[in-house]
Image (cartoon, rainbow, N blue to C red):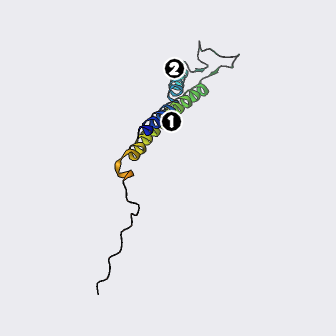
């Protein structure tokens, strides 16, 4: 039973791993919408990047926000489902269930 707790913890850590990236994408999207430019003023880039402004920058900012929300919701939903199934595995009913679940038909007493 102790091993299930360790496995659950490992799964939850893995499932919440995308959350920092989702937070980064959310901040990036909000700043892109605020400045209506991508990359926004002051953002560090690896190489010279063409600045996208206006409607195209707003679309890009919204796309970043949507990706962040979807990633966060998927992480939380997966963690909840994982916790539910681990709880089911831990339940004594799961381990003590009889091998044969089918009911035997009643015998004719004629």
The residue singled out by tag 2 in the image is: 34
Q: Farthest bottom residue? A: 110
Q: Is residue 47 left or right of residue 107?
A: right
What percent of the width, then of the height, locates residue 54? 59, 23
Secondary structure state at the residue bearing disc 2: helix
> Where 102 falls versus 71 (above or below)?
below
Q: Residues within 10 Å of mark 2 (few under 14, many from 20)?
A: few
Q: Residues within 10 Å of mark 1 (few under 14, many from 20)?
A: few
For the point 37% across and 56% down, which residue is it? 97
Q: Image quadrant for the N terminus? A: top left
Q: Is residue 91 left or right of residue 73?
A: left
Q: CA distance from mark 2 to mark 1?
A: 21 Å
Instruction: Tell me where residue 82 sits by quadrant.
Output: top left
What percent of the width, then of the height, locates residue 63? 56, 31
Using the image as rendered, state which of residue 71 and residue 61 is in the foreground: 71
The tag on residue 2 is none
Using the image as rendered, state which of residue 25 and residue 93 is in the foreground: 93
């Amino acid at each position: 039973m102790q091993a299930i707790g360790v496995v659950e913890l490992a799964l939850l850590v893995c499932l919440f791993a995308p959350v920092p990236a989702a937070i980064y994408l959310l901040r990036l999207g909000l700043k892109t919408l605020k400045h209506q430019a991508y990359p926004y003023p002051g953002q560090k880039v690896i190489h010279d990047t063409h600045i996208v402004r206006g409607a195209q920058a707003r679309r890009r900012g919204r796309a970043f926000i949507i990706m962040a929300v979807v990633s966060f919701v998927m992480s939380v939903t997966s963690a909840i489902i994982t916790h539910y199934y681990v709880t089911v595995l831990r339940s004594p009913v799961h381990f003590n269930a009889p091998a044969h679940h089918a009911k035997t038909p009643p015998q004719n007493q004629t």
